[in-house]
Image (cartoon, rainbow, N blue to C red):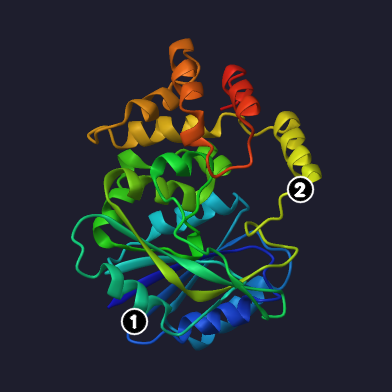
Amino acid sequence: MQVAVLMSTYNGEKYIREQIDSILSQIKVNVTLFIRDDGSTDSTVKIITQYTEKYSNIKFWVGENIGVGNSFMQLLYSLTDEFDYYAFSDQDDIWLNEKLERAIEKISKNTVPTLYVSNQILVDKNGRKLGMRYVQKPDLSYMQTLSNNKATGCTMLWNKALNDRLTDINARPSRILLDNRIHDVWISAVAGLIGEIVYDQNGYILYRQHENNVVGVKKITVFGTLKSQIEKLVGKKPRNGRSMLAYELIKGYPETKHENLLVACANSKQYRNKWIIIHSRKEIIKHTNESQIGFALKVLMNFF
């Protein structure tokens, strides 16, 4: 099986060697590793260049800093060869050598657009195991993805049927959405809308938790929640990320049957739709730390 593994890097010199070595050690698959550096200022580029001189199956580009979501998707859109499967990789984890093999086994018989995601083995910055991330299967529905995506990008593998839909030039997300909701949110939402998501409770990745994680398992604190909300209020990023995501899903895949709630989310500034969203608030925020009152205020203030 031919697998394209896509990695976006940014100042990842500390752990990048372990990550690349674990990808190159995958068994029973033929891997081509595509790496796009997103403007690193440390020795990341130098380290990767050394690997390209040794391994012909590593393809490397250095680009300007456009953010993690846009960097990953630009890399995906740049591929000219076709592969049987596609996967994302972070720059700081360690893959068990059967990671890709196990993922392919789970979806190899699927002909519809299919995304595979799995649990993760949490480790600290030194690689010491902390336990599994999920005790039970998380909610992977596209409606849940609007608020709190549970499908982690570094565990994702998808088939060509899904990739053809993802890379359709008429269905690509905007750069501003990817700044707001990043790559794995988009792919999880699309797969849940038009195809199938297969979840594996087992984990084949050592998911490293450290102070420089772009995304990871965060401790929820009152101070952290307040700080996050203040940053959203004063920041330049749009404050209606859920509505943007719903709108671009419908725009990109208009032939798909859309739930009334998704349509309402996509047009959340209309008063009738605000009521629909607020009335359905328990379904939308059941796996977030938002209060029902706070959620309703966000909807009313067009921060949804």
Out of 277 and 59, give the one closest to the viewer.
277
Q: Quadrant of residue 50?
A: bottom right
Residue type, mark 1 in image:
Asn
Residue labelled with disc 2: 221
**Which residue does the image show at 58% across and 54% down from the upper left?**
68
Quadrant where the C terminus sits is top right
Quadrant where the N terminus sits is bottom left
The correct choice, above or below, for 74 with respect to 13 in the image is above
Tag 1 near tag 2, CB within 8 Å: no
Circle 1 SS class: strand
Estimate the x, y position of residue 19 in percent, counting from the top left. 57, 77
Estimate the x, y position of residue 152 in percent, counting from the top left. 50, 59
Residue type, mark 2 in image:
Thr
The correct choice, above or below, for 35 with respect to 115 in the image is below
Mark identifier at residue 73: none
**Which residue does the image show at 60% across and 82% down from the upper left?**
18
* Residue 167 seen in the figure: no
* Residue 216 seen in the figure: yes
Estimate the x, y position of residue 155 in percent, counting from the top left. 46, 66
Q: Quadrant of residue 129?
A: bottom right
Estimate the x, y position of residue 235 in percent, counting from the top left. 72, 33
Residue labelled with disc 1: 30
Left or right of 288: which side holds 26?
A: left
* Mark 1 surroundings within 10 Å by alpha-carbon count, few (fewer than 14), some (14 through 19), many (20 or more): some
